Image (cartoon, helix red, strand yellow):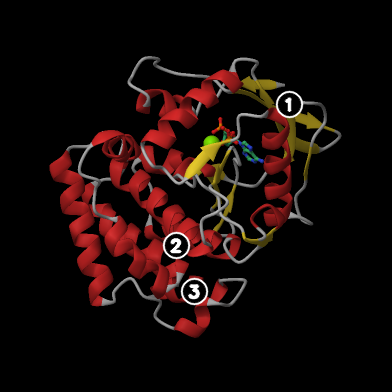
Amino acid sequence: MAAYHLGSMNRFASAAGVLIDRIRINTITRQEREGRVAWIKRRRPAARLILGFANGFFHLATAPLRALADPLLWQRWEVESFNILHAPEFHAFSPEPASAEADELPGVNLTIHLDGGTITPLMAAAAGRELHRAHQCHCPQFNGLWSHGDPHLGNFIYDDRTNRARLIDFEVMHLQALPAKERHSDDLLIFLQDMAGRIRSEAWMPCAEAFLKAYANPELTGLLLEKLKAPRWGFARLWWIVRLSYISGREWRVRFEKLRCAIQSGSCSPDNPSAAHDPSGFLIITQSSTG
Ligand SMILES: Nc1ncnc2c1ncn2[C@@H]1O[C@H](COP(=O)(O)OP(=O)(O)O)[C@@H](O)[C@H]1O
Ligand SMILES: [Mg+2]
């Protein structure tokens, strides 16, 4: 059994004033049992306090989401979201209080490719298709369409054998009062901010365009035109900078301005809009891999 202590919540900590270098909210364990491989996430006792603190920050930053500090609420959201998106092929359940267990999804998380400099437009397109597919799922908690809240690249598991990405990590939730379009365009922004912060400059536009083309919803992509402008000041601006992994202001301004121009020129729209709503997304794969 290999145990990993993966603290993605260090993002929250750095946002909250660089007081704590790395906060570990969960323990994550990979387990093999009778041929089945699963990942088991357990909440640490201090998580509630830390997430309460993070939520105070999100409130101040007017971020449209909250971390699920209550272990029961988190557990339910983690398991239900996984099953909404991946059952019947893969399953999640709650083996004990304050924990969630999920089947291993094939592939590696896209942060590995992003940080290793090996991310490609094909991978970004796979993430775009997965987000599009996930955004069509119904979700009782929203009494409407599902959204993720934190779809940075580390929360996509990409399988290069099938060119398929799948979403994981359901730790935060968008504010329930927000309409689906707001939540969905926020998910697009979060992915783009994470990618913009750490990608090689020559790979930025091909990957960002491939992601939005594969997401294939020109109306939502249009909403990004406003969202790609940074808040001017305060906690909202600090959160923006954290999301961009602290790259220089000049660099992200250039990257986002190029993307806004591309959106306006139509080069982020799907080549064939009717293909966009093919639930398998494979029409789009074919186009982007041959074109
Ligand atoms: N179901 C899964 N299938 C494959 N890998 C997983 C799965 N769950 C977690 N992982 C691995 O563990 C890492 C951390 O899991 P995640 O749910 O994102 O927790 P955290 O809240 O720490 O970010 C992922 O990036 C991935 O590498
Ligand atoms: Mg994660």
Question: Label 3 crowding class (10 Å Cα cut-off): few <14, some 14-19, many 20+?
Answer: many
Measured as percent of width and height from the top left, residue 177 is found at 55, 54
Measured as percent of width and height from the top left, residue 136 is found at 60, 66
Cα–Cα gap, marks 1 and 3: 39 Å
Which residue is denoted by mark 2 in the rendering? 125
**Residue type at numbered disc 3:** Ile
Image quadrant where one finds the N terminus = top right
Which comes sooner in the sequence, label 2 or label 3? 2
**How many labels were placed on the picture?**
3
* Residue 104 in sight in this render: no
Mark linked to residue 19? none
In the foreground, 58 or 157: 58
Query: Which image quadrant is residue 12 in?
Result: top left
* Residue 280 in sight in this render: yes
Q: Considering only vertical position in the picture, is 123 above or below 64? A: below
Left or right: residue 65 versus residue 74 is left
Cα–Cα gap, marks 1 and 2: 34 Å
Which residue is denoted by mark 3 in the rendering? 284
Measured as percent of width and height from the top left, residue 158 is found at 54, 50
Query: Which image quadrant is residue 207 in?
Result: bottom left
Report whether the residue tagged 3 is closer than 8 Å to ligand 1.
Answer: no
Dot 2 lies on which element?
helix
In the foreground, 171 or 178: 178
Q: Could you tell me if the residues under marks 2 and 3 are in contact, i.e. CB atoms within 8 Å? A: yes
Mark 1 vs mark 3: in front: 1
- Residue at the spot 82% in from the left edge and 27% down from the top edge: 96
Mark linked to residue 98? 1
Cα–Cα gap, marks 2 and 3: 9 Å
Which comes sooner in the sequence, label 1 or label 3? 1
